[in-house]
Structures are given as C-alpha cells and as structure tokens.
Image (cartoon, rainbow, N blue to C red):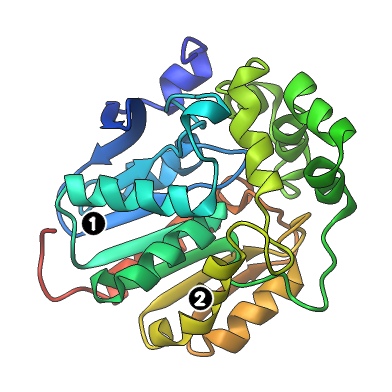
Amino acid sequence: MLDTPLLKKEYPFESHFLPLNQLKYHYLDEGQGNPVVMLHGNPSWSFYYRNLVAELREQYRVIVPDHIGCGLSDKPADSLYAFTLKQRVDDLEALLEHLDIKSNITLVVHDWGGMIGMAFATRHPERIARLVILNTAAFHLPQSKPLPTALRICRDTQFGAFLVQGFNLFARGAAVVGCKRNPMKSDLRKAYCAPYDNWQHRVATLRFVQDIPLVEGDPGYDIVSEVQDNLQQFAELPICICWGEKDFVFDMHFLNEWRQRFPQAQVHSFADCGHYILEDAKEDVIPIIRKFLTENPLRTQGS
C-alpha cells in the first residue's frame, strides 16, 4: 500500500499497532513532550497530518491514529466491528489509556475527527489543554445548513453506496474538490486514496457517511447532543481555528457556529481554500499552529 515513491517520501514514520478486539489499530507516535493528538476524518487518514507531524515532533509527542477501517488500520467487515461514533470514541480512549496519556492533551481535529475528539474530550475534560480546529464540527448540523446532496445520496441510497464502495467515488471526489488554492496533483490524490483500494477496504468510508446523525433516534445522535451541550466548558481553553471557506461540507455555517460557541478563539479563515486546509494552505496553517502552541505553553512537560 505504501510502495509508491510519494508515500515513501512523504510518510517516513514508524508504524505502531494496538491490538483492539482482535483488530490492528494503527497509529503514529513521534517525538517527546506534551502530547498532541491529531484526529483525521473521512475519507482521509493519518497521511493528512504528515507535514504537521514533521513540524511538531521535535518539541511534542505527536499521536495520530488511523480509525479502524482507515489508513493502515485493519479494514474489517461489519460482522467484526461496529462502525459507529461511540465505537470510534471508545477506540481513541483505549489508545490513549494504552499510551498512558492522561493530561495536557492538545487535540487537533478535522472532519469526523472533530466529533470523535470532542466526544472524548467531553468524557475527560480535565485531560484537554488546547484545541486546534480544522474544518469540522462537534455539534448538530446547523439549522441554516442543509445536508449536501452528494452526502445525502451516499448516506441514504443504494446507488450512492455502490458508487462509494464500487468506485471509491467519495475518496476520489474529496481529493479533487478538497483543495481550491492548490489543487492536488495526481500522485497526491492517489496517496489519499491508496488505503481504499478495493470494495472491502471502502466499508469505513461508506459507514462514516451513513453514520451521520440527522434526527433523534439515529445512532450517535445522543452523543452529538451531549457534546454540543457541553462544549461551553472548553471555551476558556486556548483555541486555534483554521478554516477553508470553500469547503464542500464544512462551510461558513459551521465556522459561524464555532465562532459563536468559542468567541475567544483565535480564528484564521482562508477565503480561497477548501476542506483539506492542511494541504491547501499548508504554508500558512502549519506556522500558525506552531506559533499558537508556542504562545500558549503548558505548565509541565511530558504526558
């Protein structure tokens, strides 16, 4: 899977695996110091954070898991794994317990990583020290924002499911439309799609979309409600928000919601950038995050 020249060059990290209910949960564990936990979304993987990992690992302990079914983690059938928000949060909790990371955590979250990460934070608010928020949500779909048609088709129709699993359309499409300022070149798009190279390996990509909770009674709806109702407890933390305004899902409706909930947050919004903000504006965003962490130091070192 990682035998392409670009992946070998741009993802030069040691892989670690946590056995999790007879599945292998892949993660990166780079550097030493206070922990920075980076959580990817769908349909990306830990590769999304590669440049930020390289930038921060000299001063921090950087932990980047691949959610089960994604990246270099195992890609089980539905009979072997519950592809639900609750299970994702349980997995993250198990990993950080295994690594004995229980304090001074900086969460870096993108896409589904925001919901997973903030659900974990709601379980353990005392462990969270800083937040870096990148085109994501930790609340229900804003009332002013309809679910995009493409997501609705993938979520609710057999035709959409066939396109996602049969043609990898979700991952391929995201790689095309996810960057606006700096569109991904072919080799980079292939790297993003590399883990999702057959029907079975695309189960998680589809299940993530199908797991979007929209109405009461949907799996995960109560978790989202609980997180949403408890976000205020994090409002006084150092928070940095970096946002691509041309995101095809997490657009200005979501950024405005974050601004309302975290009015003291440091916000950097890029009018010409899309969903994959760490690709589209990496020359701007990575130094911003580095500076934010430097200017908001934690009292002690180590996890």
Amino acid residing under circle 2: Glu
Corner quadrant of residue 236: bottom left
**Residue positioned 46% across, 82% down in the render:** 230
- Whole-percent x and y of residue 180? 76, 48
| Vertical arrangement, residue 128 with respect to residue 102, above or below | below
Return the mark for residue 273: none
Residue on which the image places disc 2: 226
| Vertical arrangement, residue 266 with respect to residue 66, above or below | below
Residue on which the image places disc 1: 35
Is residue 129 or residue 84 the one in the foreground?
Answer: 84
Front disc: 2 or 1: 2
Badge 1 element: strand
- Whole-percent x and y of residue 263? 54, 90
Structural crowding at the residue carrying mark 1, measured as other residues with C-alpha within 10 Å and reported as few (<14), some (14–19) or many (≥20):
many
Structural crowding at the residue carrying mark 2, measured as other residues with C-alpha within 10 Å and reported as few (<14), some (14–19) or many (≥20):
some
- Whole-percent x and y of residue 156? 83, 45
| Vertical arrangement, residue 175 with respect to residue 181, above or below | above
**Earlier sequence position, callout 2 versus callout 1:** 1
Measured Cα–Cα span from mark 2 to mark 1: 25 Å
Corner quadrant of residue 220: bottom right
Is residue 67 or residue 296 the one in the foreground?
Answer: 67
25 vs 282, left or right, is left
| Vertical arrangement, residue 61 with respect to residue 258, above or below | above
54 vs 248, left or right, is left
Amino acid residing under circle 1: Pro
Badge 2 element: helix
Quarter that holds the C terminus:
bottom left
4 vs 163, left or right, is left
Corner quadrant of residue 177: top right
